[in-house]
Image: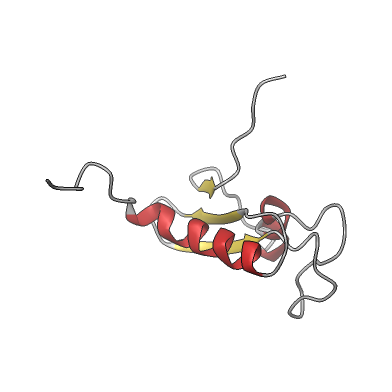
Amino acid sequence: MSDAGTALPAVWRLPFALAWEAFGAGSRPVGAALLDADGTVVACGRDRSEEATAPPGRLAGAAIAHAEIDVPAHLPSRHRYRDHRLFTTLALSPL
């Protein structure tokens, strides 16, 4: 039996690897990656809300230290990202 239909698409591998890293560090298991129109990773991040420290330039130990906040925090503000897509392992339910 083949698992070709259940294999993780390449675009999701980085967000899930980052989520696993966050889980291992004691934070919420959420990872995110921003890809441009060509599929190139422009920025990535993971949750660090339950961690006391982080690498330079990364948020940690705060309510906003989420993967979806970490990603845009590393983008130049002068560029527009309309053709980019954010892939995150967090699924939001409707209100």
Q: Quadrant of residue 49?
A: bottom right
Q: Where 75 sits versus 2, above or below?
A: below
Q: Where 94 sits versus 25, above or below?
A: above
Can residue 43 be seen from the camera position used here?
A: no
Left or right: where 76 falls relative to 82: right
Colour mode of the rendering:
secondary structure
Quadrant holding the C terminus: top right
Which residue corresponds to the image point at 41% horizontal and 61% vertical from the top-left?
Answer: 40
Which residue corresponds to the image point at 59% horizontal and 56% vertical from the top-left?
Answer: 31
Given residues 87 and 53, the one toward you in this image is: 53
Left or right: where 85 falls relative to 59: left
Q: Quadrant of residue 22?
A: bottom right
Given residues 72 and 82, the one toward you in this image is: 72
Which residue corresponds to the image point at 62% horizontal and 53% vertical from the top-left?
Answer: 30
Q: Where 23 sits versus 95, above or below?
A: below
Given residues 47 and 24, the one toward you in this image is: 24
Left or right: where 32 falls relative to 36: right
**Where in the figure is residue 35, as x and y percent of width and height?**
47, 55
